[in-house]
Image: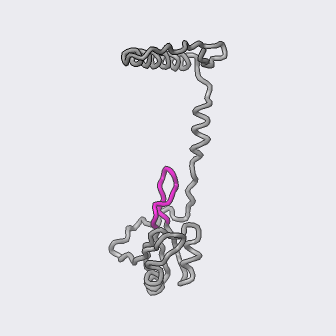
Amino acid sequence: MAELLECTDPPQSCAVEYFGQFGSVSKVRVSRAKRSTASKGYAFLKFHHAEVARIAAEAMNGYMMFGHTLKCSLVPIDQQHPQLFKGAGRKMKQKPWLQMEADRHNMKRTPEAQQKRLSRLAARSKRRSTRIKEAGIDYDEPEMQVLRARKLVLG
């Protein structure tokens, strides 16, 4: 009969190797966020023997590791979800968020999109200058000029 162990803040990369010192670990499920692939801070380990899981839970509960206190407890069979280890063997691939944002920022804009961007910029500038004048501040904002290369220059 296999037994399940729940562990908070486990050593992410070496959970199988570390808990393997107590006995054979059959499956490990580290809970991760879908969007960022960061650990949610808890994992489930399935041991081949219930006695080994009980010993591991007693030994590792309250153990300090990498600046975190591990909290290990046995999960009763009636509380185990049948699909708990679904996809446990797969590695989650992290999305290249920085590259995606750089591509979005550097993309070529169509003339219509560029015109829409410039009109929003001009409207924002006009609203800002009216608020400055209403506040009683004498400030002449530099006019914006659009060059042929579609770059904005204050001048």
Can I make out residue 1 in this image? no
Res. 146 image quadrant: top right
Give the magenta range.
30-42
Location of residue 18 with respect to 43 vertically, above or below: below
Name the image quarter holding residue 130.
top left
Pick the residue in front: 1 or 152.
152
Which residue is at a point 49% across and 67% down the rendered structure image?
29
- What residue is shown at x 43% (from left), y 76% (from top)? 72
Q: Residue placed at 58% from the left, 20% from the top?
A: 110
Q: Quadrant of the C terminus?
A: top right
Q: In the rendered image, which quarter contains the N terminus?
A: bottom left
**Is 39 in the magenta?**
yes
Q: Is residue 152 left or right of residue 78?
A: right
Residue sitting at the far left:
78
Q: Nearer the viewer, residue 17 or 137?
A: 137
Q: Position of residue 105 (x, y in %)?
A: 58, 32
Report the front residue among 50 and 40: 40
Q: Is residue 32 magenta?
A: yes
Q: How is the image coloured?
A: one colour
Residue 38 pos. (x, y %)? 51, 57
Q: Is residue 12 above or below residue 35?
A: below
- What x and y, as percent, mark residue 122? 49, 16
Percent coordinates x, y for residue 99 in the rendering: 62, 41
